[in-house]
Amino acid sequence: PTYFPRASEEIGTMLLIIERLIALDHAYVVEGNVYFSVRSDPDFGKMARMGYDELLVTANQRGNNPGDSRKRDPLDFVLWQTGKPGDPTWESPWGLGRPGWHIECSAMATRYLGEQIDIHGGGADLIFPHHPCEIAQTEPVTGKRPFVQIWMHAGLVWLDGEKMSKSLGNLVFARDALREHGADTLRWYLLSEHYREEFDYQPAEIARHGEAVQLMCAALAASSGADMPLHHEVQCSEFAAAMADDLNTPTALAVLHIMAGNILRAAADGRDVSACQAALRERAGALGFTLSD
């Protein structure tokens, strides 16, 4: 990455955004806390495709504290809050306090990526409230819509029937999985599920995906003949269509598997497979495969 931004180093940017939101009547101050007024944004929560009552339930489950009596609307969210004993705090026009959860991301995104973003990723659990709050607090300040062109929400990963999370202490670290399985095998396993779908991480299943990787390696190492060239245009079109279909990596991998099999059979018959090998390598590389397992 070019930057490793830290929220604690962007407090000044957050304060500028909050002050601007207050000036635009999108936010209000109560007892040293600053809240965003969701009723000032008629499109608030549109991404979540939920009714008001469902938004309220979800907000309650995910820390938006709708029971705070200082809010004008239960869905209003904190931009700045007074610090509690033991909290890290910073000076602000409203007294000592700390930023809300959502404002941090708007500050860092606009500071390092600009006022509009092509692609914004995140877990599916951020579809509400976090990402709608980001949109609501960013667009009035920049005056540009949409804040994000494409939202990509990844499905949650489960382990032994429980959501993988820091709070549960059941995380699997990439460095450990890489050490055990190798980069290409692990990558094939992860890409075999569509990124938006939830999936159950099963270490015992990873090894068998190494067979597909070895098939590709064998196809690329096969000796090319000089007879009738092997055509690959259909598979290349299918690969492109899969990737254009919301990054349908399971289908894209299936196409690579077919290409590798075609190469091995054609090479055994003495056909010229060099162009097809180059096409396979290029598309595998687009998915991040090193083919060095």
Image: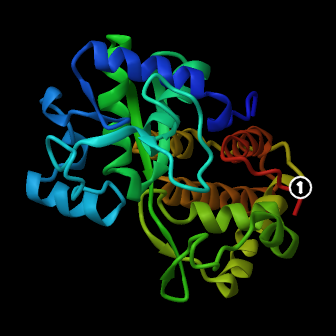
Q: Is residue 257 above or below residue 227?
A: below
In screen coordinates, is 292 left or right of 47?
Answer: right
Residue drawn at point x = 32 percent, y = 54 percent: 64
Residue drawn at point x = 19 percent, y = 52 percent: 69
Residue 291 image position (x, y, % from top left): 83, 55
Residue 242 image position (x, y, % from top left): 46, 47
Residue 241 image position (x, y, % from top left): 44, 41
Comparing 122 with 228, the one in front is 122
The residue identified by callout 1 is 221
Q: Is residue 29 above or below residue 189?
A: above
Residue 123 visible at all: yes
**Quarter placement of the N terminus:** top right
Amino acid type of disc 1? Ala
Residue drawn at point x = 64 percent, y = 69 percent: 189
Comparing 127 with 275, the one in front is 127
In screen coordinates, is 145 left or right of 218?
Answer: left
Residue drawn at point x = 45 percent, y = 43 percent: 82
Rendered image quadrant of residue 79: top left
Rendered image quadrant of residue 131: top left
Comparing 237 with 56, the one in front is 56
Residue 145 visible at all: no
Mark 1 surroundings within 10 Å by alpha-carbon count, few (fewer than 14), some (14 through 19), many (20 or more)? few
Q: Is residue 114 above or below residue 275?
A: above
